[in-house]
Amino acid sequence: MRGWQKAAAAAAAAAGTLGAAAAFGFRRAVLRRDRTEEEWDKKIYDSAYGGCHDEIVADIQWFFAQKPEEVSIRSRDGLRLKGYCLEAPSAKGCVLLFHGFRSRGVMDFAMVLPELYQSGYSLLVVDQRAHGRSEGKYIGYGILERYDCQQWAFYMDAKTGGRVPLFLEGMSMGAATVMMAAELPLPKSVRGIVADCGYNSAWEEVRHCIHRWYRLPAFPVLHLTDLLCRALAGYSLRDTTASKSLANSRLPILLIHGTGDDFVPASMTAENYAAAAGEKRQVLVEGAVHAASYLMDRERCKKELLDFLDAHAKL
C-alpha cells in the first residue's frame, strides 16, 4: 500500500472512530431510555438515596395513595406531556416539580412530597419530555423543557383560576429547566423558583461528564455530539444558559447545592446565584453529593424551602 493510501486509510479509520464516539455520546446523553420498575428500584439502592430506600418507597406509595389526578398538556412541538396533580385543601400555593436527567419526579422529590402537601401546598409532579409517561424521543437539558415548564405554569394558572401562588421547583436537569424558564413570559401567579443542584450550561455539563465518566477531552466528541443534537433533536447544547435566563428575570430564587457534588459541580450554582437579578438565596450543604442535600441536612433544607415558599406565597 502506498503512503497516501495508508494516510487515507488512517484518516478514514479516525473519522469512523470519532463518528462512533459521537453517536455513542448522543445515545447516552440525548436519546430516551425507559427503565423497568426493577431498574428504578435498583437505581434507588445504587444512588445517594440508597440508605433511604424504604422511606422513599413508602413516600412514593403515600403519594399514589392520595389518588392524584393524572393530567396532561400538549407541548408546542406536539408532544403529549403528562403529570400528576394533587390539590391540597385550601391550598396556600402549588409547587410544580421537575425531575432530573433520566429520573422521575416521584423519586427525586419522594421525601418532600408529604411535607409540602401537609404544609398546605398542592403538587404538580411532571414527567419531563422523553421520560416516564410523557412522549418524546430526545432529552433537551432544559433548553427544550423550559417551554414545557412555561406551558405547565399556564396550565396550573388556568386550573386554579389564577388565585393560587405557583412555584417552579427542579432537581438537577429539572433545576436547569425551571431556571431557563425564568425569562419566558409566565403567569403572574408564579411567585418564585427553587433550583436544587442545577447546572448553568448544558454544554459545560456534558463537557464535565465526558471528562468525569470517560476521561476524554471535550474536543471533538462534544462538538460532534452537539452537531447530532442540532440535526436530530432540533437544538444546540449552547442555545442558552441558566445564568442568562436568571439575569433576565426578577423572580425570587432559592438555590440549593451540595459541596460534594461531582456530577454537577457546586460552582455552577455559584454562577447562577451571581447572575440572578431578583431576590436570591443560596444554601450550600457541606459534603452532600449530587441531589442529596435534602438527605444530608433534612431539617435545614426543609426549613429553607418552606420559609421561602411561605414568604412568597403571602406576597
Image (cartoon, rainbow, N blue to C red):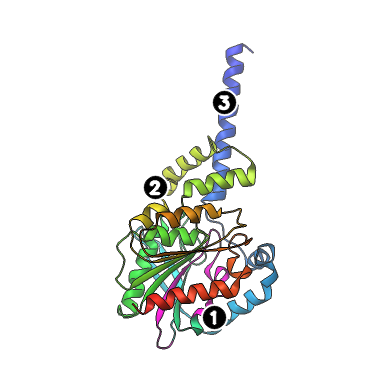
Say if 237 sits above or below 164 in the image: above
Residue type indicated by callout 3:
Ala
Q: How many marks?
A: 3
**Residue 265 visible in the snapshot:** yes
**Residue 138 visible in the snapshot:** no
Residue type indicated by callout 1:
Pro
Q: Which quadrant holds the N terminus?
A: top right
| Residue that appears at 36% across and 74% down | 156
Q: Which quadrant holds the C terminus?
A: bottom left
Question: On the image, numbered disc 3 is attached to which residue?
Answer: 12
Q: Nearer the viewer, mark 3 or mark 1?
A: 1
Please tell me whether mark 3 sits on a helix, a strand or a loop: helix
* Percent position of residue 13, x then y: 60, 27
Please tell me whether mark 1 sits on a helix, a strand or a loop: helix
Q: Nearer the viewer, mark 2 or mark 3?
A: 2
Q: Which residues are magenta?
A: 89-116
Question: On the image, numbered disc 1 is attached to which residue?
Answer: 114
> Within the magenta stretch, is there residue 104?
yes
Label 3 vs label 1: CA separation?
A: 57 Å
- Tell me: 10 left or right of 202: right
Identify the mark nearer the N-term, 1 or 2.
Answer: 1
| Residue that appears at 50% across and 58% down | 198
Q: Are marks 1 and 2 in contact (CB under 8 Å)?
A: no
Question: On the image, numbered disc 2 is attached to which residue?
Answer: 239
* Percent position of residue 204, x then y: 50, 46
